[in-house]
Image: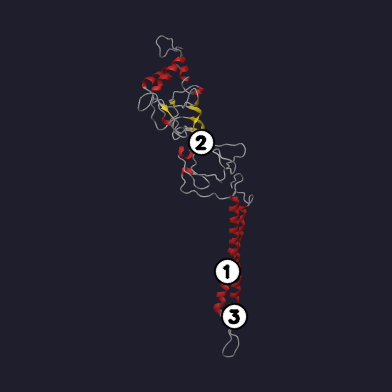
Amino acid sequence: MSTDVFASDGATSILDTVATLQEEILNLNLAKTAKGARRTSDLPVATRAKLKNLPEDAKVRVSGVAGYPSVEPLPIFVKQEAEKLLSADYGSADIVLGGTDRNAARGSGYAGDTQAAKIDMVVGRGGSNTRFLDATTGGSSYIDPDFEKDSARIYMSQKSKMHEYFNLKAAIKGGDVAAEGSSAVVIKADNVGLISRGALKLTTLYGGEKSTGGSNDSYSGIILMANNDNSDLQPLVKGTSLLNALRSMVDLIDDVRSILVSFLDMQMDFNTKLMNHKHISPFNAENTSESPDLMVAAMLHNANLMAKTFTSLKSTAMNLANHEKDFFEKWGSSEGKYILSDFNYTN
């Protein structure tokens, strides 16, 4: 199979062809807002034609398949003099070691400070709209750290402004403050997963000394804040305390039920006495007969209290007991109604 796709003299090898193509695509400009699996529509017509006409084994070498390089924009990273850049041979993935803390151009962050070292691990600099050419000058595209657009990053700094760099809202509560000048580690990506084969602990510390010097003498909490929205932050509920509070509430409800049962006992006793009571006749000082209407009404009233109210109160007692068993006892329900987690704990 011939390998002189670009050269008429037949002297260009497949590897030279691929290298030449990689150099040519540095003159492209991608300005799309959403990424497909592969983008070739941004390539110049002539370059797309050359790609199409490559021999099959040469196409593989620029396909990104099986570890081969891929045709994609790779802007030039603007490096501080003191920074050491460890870059992948192909693809946008690098680690910046050393230099001073910064979140953008070389003079940003704590540039010029001592004890402000950093490590910045990034894939996908510039995000989805990485350019081959500078949109203004038309020359090579240069890029600084961009904590907003870069696709994924792990940033470790000895001295930083974490809240400012990543536009994080301070929780105000839980000991969270928009700390400046302290060490920080931040992970940012479209999705982040922390996976542990054992226990996973999120822990804050009290005591000791801070990285900036001085005592770590303030208590701090763990803030879970969705959508970076601090407008309605509320404290978490402690499970065992909640369980005890709910048990007390059930006991109070049962106390009210018992009071009502006692009241009904007295009411029925009163109804019975009222039903059977007699008056003394003013004519011969003898007892009168019971009131037929009152006897019927009292008998019906007592019957309804027994049939409905007492029965309902007994059902309520059973329901409260079952409620406690199902929701408050770990093995109380086969349907998994127990309200406390078997695995997750907080203070």
Q: Give the amino acid type for the residue marked by disc 2 in the picture.
A: Lys
305 to 82, vertically: above or below: below
- Between 81 and 84, which is closer to the camera in this rendering? 81
How far apart, in angstroms, are the residues tagged by discs 1 and 2?
75 Å
Question: Is residue 36 toward the left or the right of residue 274 in the image?
Answer: left
133 to 294, vertically: above or below: above
Residue 91: percent from the left, percent from the top? 47, 25
296 to 143, vertically: above or below: below
Q: Residues within 10 Å of mark 1 (few under 14, many from 20)?
A: some
- For disc 1, the marked residue is 305
- The furthest residue to the bottom: 283
> What element does badge 2 sit on?
strand
> What element does badge 3 sit on?
loop
- For disc 2, the marked residue is 159
- For disc 3, the marked residue is 277
Residue 264: percent from the left, percent from the top? 59, 69
Residue 293's quadrant in the figure?
A: bottom right
Residue 54: percent from the left, percent from the top? 43, 17
Residue shown at 58% from the left, 77% from the top: 274
How far apart, in angstroms, are the residues tagged by discs 2 and 3?
91 Å
* Image depth: mark 2 or mark 3 in front: 2
